Each structure stands twice: as structure tokens, then as C-alpha cells.
Image: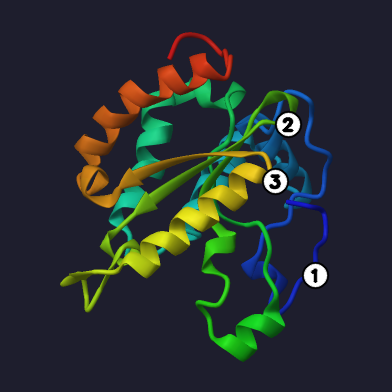
Amino acid sequence: MDNDIEIVGDPENQLVYDRPIPDHGLRWRDLQSWWQDTRKILDEGEAKASLYQRLHRCLPDNSPGQQNFFGAYHHVLGARVYDLPVLLPEVWLHWDHQTVRERGPHALLRSRMDFLLLLPHGQRIVLEVDGSQHYTRDRGQRPDSAKYAEMMAADRDLKLRGYEVFRFGHDELEEAREAQALLEQFLPILFQRFEIRAGTV
């Protein structure tokens, strides 16, 4: 996000959008255009489908809530998604491969966002889906105040960097219909709050 990029390992496992973010933010239309150009895809329908599948593959298999959130976002917005902010999954604010190697794969998990929206005029929205592992230990059997404090510290850090953070409980997204109903209520209010318009949500 800060334009300091080093690719480690297989470049096919990461997506790096290498164009300037427009003043209107990053819309699905912008990302699809980049995807279509860099992958030399001639058909727009094929580009749309393959980009959606590629983004969906970023989602963790052990988080139905995140998968349902992603699907519901596109279902609720439908064709209007082209001119609305693209929902970017699993975005790294900062990733230090040496730190991960030294401290283990969970060393900088707080630097990864579940979802990111890049809105007009540099506004950034982080959407987090929190399961019980975010605030419990022993497989959800006991509360863990240290984990909770760590999560709150990460939120403060993001807000000081200019991000707005909205958190969702995994339980409220566990079923696809529940996720859709939730986003049908949430998205119009979010877009109104940040003055995002592309038809009526």
C-alpha cells in the first residue's frame, strides 16, 4: 500500500496492481481493465469471470464468513459493481519475509487486511471478519485479553495511518443468506457516509 514492494517466492501467488490509484479510487472497472491488459484477455466477460475467480482464491478456506462476505458484496451490487469500489481480499499493508522466517508465519498477521476498499480522494476502508480466534485461546474455550488488546492496538495503528476500520463477527456471516441481508443494510449506509455513488444501492 505504501509502494514499497519486494516479491518473494512465486510471483504468480501475488497480485501487484502497478498503476496509479485514480482520484475516484479503485473501482472494479479499473482493476478489470488492468487484469485484461496484463493477461492479454480479449473478451470482457472472460476477464470479469477470471478476475473474480482469482480474487476468490485469495480467501482462506477456513473462513466461510470471508467467502460469504465476498460473494454477498458482488451479489448485492450486481452490475453496479463496475463503477463502485472493488473489494480487495487479503491485502498486505506490510510484509517482511525475514521477520516471518525468524518468528513464524503468524509474525505479522496484523499487517494483513481481510478486505480493503480504496475510495475517492485517498479514503481507505478496512473490513475485517473476526472469528473467535481473534479474542480466545484453547480453540475458543477461554477468553484471551492479550489477543483482544493486540487487535485493538492494530486498529489504532491503522486509523492513525488514515484507514477506517469496520469489524464483523464471523457468526453473522456464517450463512450466505445472512451475509447478503447484512450487506444489503450496510453497504448503502457505508456508501452514503463516504459519498460513493453509482446508481442506487
Q: Residue at x 69, y 45 (%)?
A: 161
Label 1 crowd (10 A; few <14 / some 14-19 / many >=20): few
- In the rendered image, residue 105, in percent from the top left (x then y), is placed at 53, 81
| Residue 122: numbered disc | 2
In this orientation, which residue lies closer to the viewer: 173 or 164?
164
Q: CA distance from mark 1 to mark 3?
A: 20 Å
- In the rendered image, residue 63, in percent from the top left (x then y), is placed at 33, 60
Q: Is residue 79 left or right of residue 160?
A: left
Q: Is residue 197 visible?
A: yes
Q: Which residue is mark 3?
A: 35
Q: Residue at x 73, y 56 (%)?
A: 16
Look at label 1 and name its amino acid.
Glu
| Mark closer to the chain start, 3 or 2 | 3
In the orientation shown, which residue stands out farthest toward the bottom?
102
The image shows residue 148, relative to residue 108, as above or below, that is above
Number of marks: 3
Look at label 3 and name its amino acid.
Trp
Q: CA distance from mark 1 to mark 2?
A: 23 Å
Q: Nearer the viewer, mark 1 or mark 3?
A: 1
| Mark closer to the chain start, 1 or 3 | 1
Q: Residue at x 63, y 90 (%)?
A: 102
In the orientation shown, which residue stands out farthest toward the left?
141
| Residue 6: numbered disc | 1
Q: Are marks 1 and 2 in contact (CB under 8 Å)?
A: no
| Mark closer to the chain start, 1 or 2 | 1
| Residue 109: numbered disc | none
- In the rendered image, residue 57, in percent from the top left (x then y), is placed at 48, 59
Q: At numbered mark 1, what does the secondary structure look like: helix, strand or loop?
A: loop
Q: Nearer the viewer, mark 3 or mark 2?
A: 2
